[in-house]
Image (cartoon, rainbow, N blue to C red):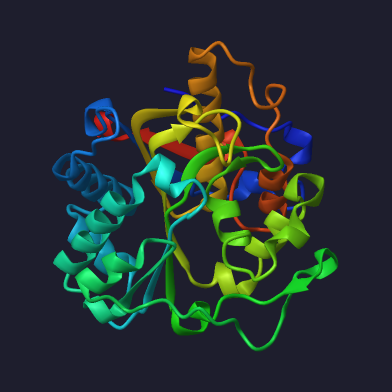
């Protein structure tokens, strides 16, 4: 399994004095190709894997206890998927059903849950809150990067669960936790694609509107886009049955970046960047306080080892 690689130590989180920290960012990684034989997802196996991963991430005996530790009784839960290449990858419906079923089993109510970038029929079938397709009234300022408006759903939500695909990206190097939020929740994402989407990805994720509400990241690598993303063809997508669960979106993306390079190596492809370099967006997100990018500050745990 691919391991997270560190950025050059002198460029990562220089001002944070990480050596004084006692707690690492935990990333639970599960991989089982049996979960996705070709494009057919074994949802019972996915449910078991997801529940165990969430529980392990939160240090509880069950998923129900984990959700209750993570979320309040009255939280309004916004679950952000990724619509880019979703029909081709084909795993969002199963992931949405599985995740919502797990939350409902923990006694959260359907009206507390809203799915973004999943086919509307699933929200209707499960009687969930429907997305609000409007935008916030006031622009959010992202420092020197600029400003834009967030989706109005963020006014309603008190908790965000982030469910990105794991993909390569011809401009941003990769799509994972950070880009799924930064460019998926604002009105004009094309404005923020310059310079490999950096520092935009870091600056937008550092905004209090997102940081204060983001509770969990579940990286959906059931089918991984390992090359020519984000809008690749079937040739560049492989069924892997891979998931990563973490509260830290930066650590999650670091682990995901390592796994993308692991898959590419198995295909005889070069690393996405020169080793041990990380995408600029991850290094800057660390500096902006969004999460951890240094290998010594990330605790990567295989679900099979628990």
Dividing the picture into quadrants, the one containing residue 29 is top left
> For this rendering, which residue is in front, 143 or 194?
194
- Looking at the image, residue 240 sits to the left or right of residue 200; the answer is left
Name the foreground residue: 80 vs 253.
Answer: 80
Q: Is residue 145 left or right of residue 299?
A: right
The quarter of the displayed image where residue 122 is located: bottom left
Residue 31 spot, x, y in % from top left: 32, 30
Name the side, left or right, on which 178 lies relative to 16. left
Image coordinates of residue 254 in percent, x first then y, are 56, 38
Please provide percent x and percent y for residue 217: 43, 54
Query: Which quadrant does the N terminus fall into?
Result: top left
**For residue 170, above or below residue 213:** above
The answer to whether residue 59 shows anywhere in this view is: no
Vertical arrangement, residue 35 with respect to residue 96, above or below: above
* The furthest residue to the right: 144
Task: Please name the residue shown 43% across and 78% down the image.
Answer: 158
Q: Residue at x 48, y 54 (%)?
A: 82
Query: Residue 242, percent across and down?
Result: 36, 34
| Quadrant location, the C terminus | top left
Above or below, comparing residue 126 to residue 93 in the picture: below
**238 and 240: which is toward the camera:** 238
- Whether residue 270 is visible here, answered yes or no, is yes
Which residue corresponds to the image point at 66% horizontal and 45% vertical from the top-left? 282
The residue drawn where x is 61% and y is 75% is: 150
């Amino acid at each position: 399994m691919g391991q997270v690689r560190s950025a050059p130590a002198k460029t990562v989180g220089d001002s944070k004095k990480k050596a004084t920290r006692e707690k690492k960012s935990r990333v639970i990684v599960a991989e089982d190709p049996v979960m996705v034989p070709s494009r057919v997802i074994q949802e019972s196996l996915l449910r078991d894997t997801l529940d165990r991963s969430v529980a392990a991430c939160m240090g509880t005996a069950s998923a129900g206890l984990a959700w209750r530790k993570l979320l309040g009784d009255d939280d309004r839960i916004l679950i952000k998927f990724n619509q880019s290449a979703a029909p081709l990858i084909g795993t969002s419906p199963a992931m949405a059903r599985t995740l919502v079923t797990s939350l409902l089993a923990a006694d959260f109510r359907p009206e507390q849950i809203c799915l973004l970038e999943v086919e509307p029929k699933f929200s209707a079938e499960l009687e969930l809150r429907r997305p609000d397709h409007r935008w916030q009234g006031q622009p959010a300022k992202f420092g020197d990067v600029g400003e834009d408006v967030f989706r109005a759903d963020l006014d309603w939500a008190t908790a965000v669960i982030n469910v990105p695909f794991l993909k390569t990206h011809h401009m941003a190097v990769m799509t994972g936790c950070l880009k799924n939020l930064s460019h998926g929740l604002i009105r004009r994402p094309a404005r923020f694609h310059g310079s490999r989407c950096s520092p935009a990805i870091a600056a937008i994720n550092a905004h209090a509107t997102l940081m204060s509400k983001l509770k969990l990241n579940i990286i959906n690598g059931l089918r991984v886009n390992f090359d020519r993303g984000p809008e690749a063809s079937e040739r560049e997508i492989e069924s892997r049955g891979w998931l990563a669960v973490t509260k830290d979106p930066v650590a999650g993306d670091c682990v995901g970046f390592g796994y993308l390079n692991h898959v590419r190596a198995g295909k005889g492809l070069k690393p996405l960047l020169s080793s041990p370099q990380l995408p600029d967006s991850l290094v800057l997100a660390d500096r902006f306080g969004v999460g951890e990018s240094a290998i010594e500050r990330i605790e990567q745990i295989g679900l099979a080892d628990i």
